[in-house]
């Protein structure tokens, strides 16, 4: 591995900013100190005027491989992630076939070991009938168990109460849930089909997948977790009402119940369906404008613990279908950090809080070993950000295989210049170092 020397950077780490140099050796942060310019290095980066952050850890992405590679591959989406400052990802099990056995789960790890420039982990999927496989999952090697308490791809809706109780009672590790009440959604969908027929507007999505559906399901998950002392993590909270389920009363590492918010639920609201339509159709739905402010308030108050993307690409043709047929999901991972830095420019959040929620908190919640911080001895997952250079989103700069983004035509006020993954300079000003692979994440459990 190359020795990398980053000079004159402003580091953002553990609630403070400070100027220092960083020396990377054997894949790890060897030293953080003033004036390391005399040290030997294969790569020297003068980062004067730039901010050095820990690499972003995205705990919820859908990279579509295997089985859905007409939408995306692990390789294509991991490249987009790295270009956006994300050095590690945790990917969901609703690929084809669904990752419902240990053998199928390991198939995904094998693909990533060959093709992903980012560090990786994959969730083990739960269904109504694979409990024995779920309980074989190695807590040291796998990020968590994923439970869809709402409709999903294939055989992954867990709606059997006894199965849910068995998972919550017996899981040896973190259980991550998608929480939407299926009965509520189906009843709402039937009502709107009756009203609109086949030509329904995308703006009805938050009325079908409404606050009630989210709150009911999230409340059940919290109740089960409290009953069985389960380590629960609720994904993509989308309503202000749900934020009241969570607390900031204990240190994050000691929390038994945690939650995340996704960038699109902070950015978009129901008014955006008029312009973007199915492009922002996702589950849970992007909802009415007041929820954005409530979610941000809960994030800043530490009731919501992590910022993630739920990156979920579909082809442009699929998204052009009528509302009822168009799939749910938005490609976001390339610009998630840009989005949060835009909020920083708007005075809504500090750099320290962005780093806390996108880097430190995922490492703490999932107990990722030796990542998520700028610390000597930790793996060198690093991103350099220039807050005075802009990033234009257009077809030529998009790296998603699907080739589109709801941000096309937008210019963000920050630029990601360098991304270092496990000690390798993988991305530099639009150019990738080919043939470099990320590492499998390990967990201190």
Image (cartoon, rainbow, N blue to C red):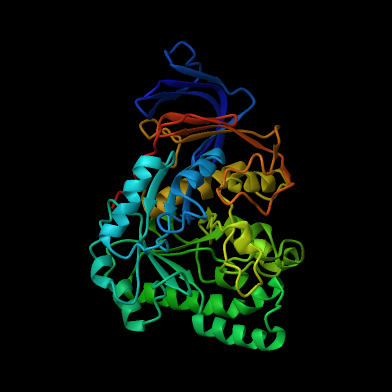
Q: Residue 410: x percent and y percent?
A: 73, 46
Q: Residue 90: x percent and y percent?
A: 42, 52
Depth order, front residue of 11/83 = 83
Q: Quadrant of residue 88?
A: top left
| Residue pictured at 64% horizontal, 51% vertical | 404
Judged left or right of residue 59, residue 198 is right
Q: Quadrant of residue 136?
A: bottom left
Q: Quadrant of residue 440?
A: top left
Depth order, front residue of 389/93 = 93
| Residue 301 in sight in this render | no
Count the numbered circles shown.
0
| Residue pictured at 54% horizontal, 21% vertical | 45
Is 305 placed above or below 372 here? below
Picture quarter with the N terminus: top left
Is 337 placed above or below 165 here? above
Is 420 placed above or below 91 here? above
Judged left or right of residue 65, residue 283 is right
Q: Residue 422: x percent and y percent?
A: 40, 34
Depth order, front residue of 294/173 = 173
| Residue situated furthest top in the rendering | 38
| Residue 292 in sight in this render | yes
Judged left or right of residue 408, residue 442 is left
Q: Residue 113: x percent and y percent?
A: 34, 42
């Amino acid at each position: 591995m190359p020795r990398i020397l980053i000079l004159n950077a402003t580091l953002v780490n553990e609630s403070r900013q400070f100027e220092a140099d960083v020396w990377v050796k054997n894949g790890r942060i060897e030293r953080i100190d003033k004036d390391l310019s005399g040290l030997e290095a294969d790569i020297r980066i003068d980062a004067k005027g730039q901010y050095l952050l820990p690499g972003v850890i995205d705990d919820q992405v859908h990279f579509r491989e295997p089985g859905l590679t007409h939408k995306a591959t692990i390789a294509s989406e991991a490249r987009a992630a790295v270009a956006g400052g994300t050095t590690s990802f945790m990917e969901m099990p609703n690929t084809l076939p669904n990752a419902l056995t240990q053998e199928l789960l390991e198939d995904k790890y094998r693909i990533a070991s060959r093709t992903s420039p980012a560090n990786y982990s994959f969730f083990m999927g739960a269904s109504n009938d694979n409990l024995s496989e779920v309980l074989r999952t190695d807590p040291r090697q796998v990020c968590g168990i994923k439970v869809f308490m709402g409709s999903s791809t294939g055989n992954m809706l867990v709606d059997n109460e006894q199965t849910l109780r068995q998972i919550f009672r017996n899981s040896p590790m973190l259980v991550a849930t998608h929480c939407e009440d299926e009965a509520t959604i189906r009843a709402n969908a039937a009502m709107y089909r009756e009203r609109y027929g086949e030509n329904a507007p995308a703006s009805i999505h938050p009325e079908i997948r409404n606050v009630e559906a989210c709150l009911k399901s999230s409340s059940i998950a919290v109740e089960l977790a409290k009953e069985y002392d389960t380590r629960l993590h609720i994904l993509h909270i989308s309503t202000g009402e749900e934020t009241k389920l969570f607390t900031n009363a204990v240190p994050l590492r000691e929390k038994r119940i945690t939650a995340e918010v996704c960038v699109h639920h902070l950015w978009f609201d129901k008014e955006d369906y008029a312009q973007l339509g199915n492009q922002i159709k996702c589950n849970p739905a992007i909802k009415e404008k007041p929820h954005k402010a409530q979610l941000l308030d809960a994030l800043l108050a530490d009731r919501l613990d992590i910022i993630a993307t739920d990156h979920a690409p579909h082809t442009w043709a699929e998204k052009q279908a009528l509302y009822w047929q168009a799939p749910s999901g938005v490609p976001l991972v390339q610009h998630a950090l840009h989005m949060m830095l835009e909020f920083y420019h708007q005075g809504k959040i500090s750099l320290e809080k962005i780093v806390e929620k996108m880097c430190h908190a995922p490492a703490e919640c999932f107990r990722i070993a030796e990542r998520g911080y700028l610390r000597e001895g930790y793996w060198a997952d690093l991103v350099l950000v220039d807050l005075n250079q802009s990033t234009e989103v257009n077809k030529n700069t998009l790296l998603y295989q699907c080739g589109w983004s709801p941000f096309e035509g937008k210019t963000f006020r920050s630029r990601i210049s360098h991304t270092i993954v496990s000690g390798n300079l993988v991305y530099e000003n639009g150019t990738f170092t080919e043939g470099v692979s990320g590492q499998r994440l390990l967990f201190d459990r």
